[in-house]
Image (cartoon, grey):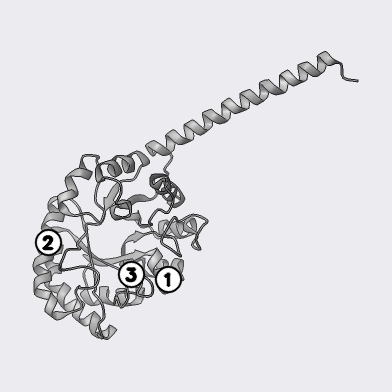
Amino acid sequence: MTTPSSRRDAIKKVATMALAGTALSSLSERVSAHESAVGTALKGKVNHSVCAWCYGGIPLENLSQAARDMGIKSIEIISPEQFETIKKYDLTCAMVGSISKDWGISRGWNRKEHHAPLVEFYRDLIDKTSAAGFTNLICFSGNRNGLSDEQGIINCAEGLKQVIGYAEKKKVTLVMELLNSKVDHKDYQCDHTNWGVELCKAVGSDRFKLLYDIYHMQIMEGDVIRTIRENQQFIAHYHTGGVPGRNEIDETQELFYPAIMQAIVDTGFKGFVAQEFVPKRPDKLASLRQGVQICDV
């Protein structure tokens, strides 16, 4: 039979152990939080970037500091006048933006009448990208507007060849983004990997490649991992995003990003992977940190 004193001793022992466990758990949580904050927990196999437009409510200065503290190396899809802000935080821009009042997703290289002004527009951006020490500059096909896919490739290649030599000289890669035409960008022409690959072959330069947006290509064609493995030589950059909805890339959506990221790493890819999901939760930076950790295989 247990005596009152032995029962009290046992209770004290359990209480002491519980307090110790609580303290240890609290310490562990603080260490983990610190590691996440300063980026020391990252494994170094993936170069992480983030698209600024997804965090429009956060000043670029604040986003830059938070990104650096998370171990993110780049903030992208920004314009040349924003370069100095991210450089203050020792960040690069893994993909320079190119959307203006005249040019963007729906108006691009697939129309011959666009070629002359686009060459002038891109030569200026190539100069600014190169002068800043950056290497990737985004571009777009434009919408079909009745144009066949075959003619779209011919037209894009004809226009891009007028500026690609200058990009080669300046060591800047023009990178055309693959986007879905089913949900977000109706009628956009560069909406399948095969189309983009054929355009790469037609341009015939290592300074023209594709931005494989995982979110967009899951919507258009699926088969993400096999497609990446078979076409990795044409891909310069990757974007993330949860499907459906383009929100957080965790268990709330249908893609399993750890496997996708491992497939990218296994190809020997040395470029950047950018988080381009739109945070749905109130703490946007916590969602960003989670996305980076999910992709850090």
Q: Residue at x 42, y 58 (%)?
A: 247
Q: Amino acid at mark 3?
A: Leu
Q: In the rendered view, tell whether residue 25 sits above or below residue 225.
A: above
Is 189 left or right of 170, judged from the image as shown? right
Q: Position of residue 127 (x, y in %)?
A: 11, 57
Looking at the rendered structure, the secondary structure element under dot 2 is: helix
Picture quadrant of residue 176: bottom left
Q: Which residue is pictured at 87% across the width and 19% down the height?
A: 2
Residue type at numbered disc 2:
Lys
Crowdedness near tag 1: few (<14), some (14–19) or many (≥20) residues, C-alpha within 10 Å: some
Q: Is residue 110 left or right of residue 182?
A: left
Bin the neighbour count of mark 2 within 10 Å (Cα to Cα): few under 14, some 14-19, many 20 and up.
few
Mark pair 3, 2: CA separation? 28 Å
Per the model, the C-alpha gap separating discs 3 and 1 is 9 Å
> Which quadrant of the figure contains the N terminus?
top right
Is residue 33 in view?
yes
Instruction: Find residue 229 and report its image quarter.
Output: bottom left
Q: Position of residue 24 (x, y in %)?
A: 57, 27
Secondary structure beneath label 1: helix
Which residue carries the number 3 mark?
179
**Which label's residue is closer to the chain start, 3 or 1?**
3
Residue position marked by numbered label 1 in the rendering: 219
Q: Which residue is mark 2?
A: 169
In terms of image quadrants, where is residue 234? bottom left
Give whichever of 11, 280 is nearer the camera: 280
- Residue occupying the point 82% across, 13% down: 5
Which circle, 1 or 2, is nearer the viewer? Answer: 1
Q: Are marks 3 and 1 in contact (CB under 8 Å)?
A: no
Give the mark nearest the N terminus, 1 or 2: 2
Q: In the rendering, at what x and y percent does residue 204 appear?
A: 22, 73
